[in-house]
Amino acid sequence: MDTRKVLSGLCYFSIFFAGILFPFVVMLASGDDVTKSHAKKAFLSHLIPLIPVPLLIFAIFSDLNAINNDAIPVFTLVSAGILILISLIVTIWNVIKGVKALMME
């Protein structure tokens, strides 16, 4: 199997084992333009689930009063649900793109 295909696929699959570190290293170290392009796309897609994290942190702090009063922390639950949904979508997308990268010609 071609090194280009393996590195490109591993950049996407690294969401399971190395997060943003592996695509970043490949992006900096690779001399191949195709591999570097896949590494950039994988790196950016690995950053997407980090976008709603400040919203979740804000929700937790804003719902502290509700938690102390035995109320349901709705804002926190909705924010956590959005974060989980985005992470699931990005993971599925990375698996699809990783398989496509391994199968490219």
Image (cartoon, rainbow, N blue to C red):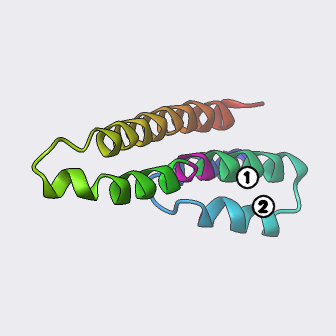
- Residue positioned 73% across, 31% down in the render: 104
Residue 70, percent from left and from top:
10, 49
Could you say which disc has been placed on residue 39 in the image?
A: 1
Could you say which disc has been placed on residue 69 in the image?
A: none
Does residue 10 appear in the picture of this structure? no
Could you say which disc has been placed on residue 27 in the image?
A: 2
Q: Nearer the viewer, residue 56 or 1?
A: 56
Q: How many marks?
A: 2
Is-magenta flag for residue 21? Answer: no
Q: Quadrant of the C terminus?
A: top right
Give SS at disc 1: helix
Magenta highlight: main SS: helix
Q: Residues within 10 Å of mark 2 (few under 14, many from 20)?
A: many
Please, is residue 61 above or below residue 46 in the view?
Answer: below
Residue 87, percent from left and from top:
46, 41
- Residue positioned 76% across, 51% down in the render: 40
Q: Residues within 10 Å of mark 1 (few under 14, many from 20)?
A: many
User: Could you tell me the amino acid type at mark 2?
Assistant: Met
Does residue 27 appear in the picture of this structure? yes
Q: Are marks 1 and 2 in contact (CB under 8 Å)?
A: yes
Q: State the extent of the magenta-drawn residues as a range.
A: 47-51
Is-magenta flag for residue 48? Answer: yes
Give SS at disc 2: helix
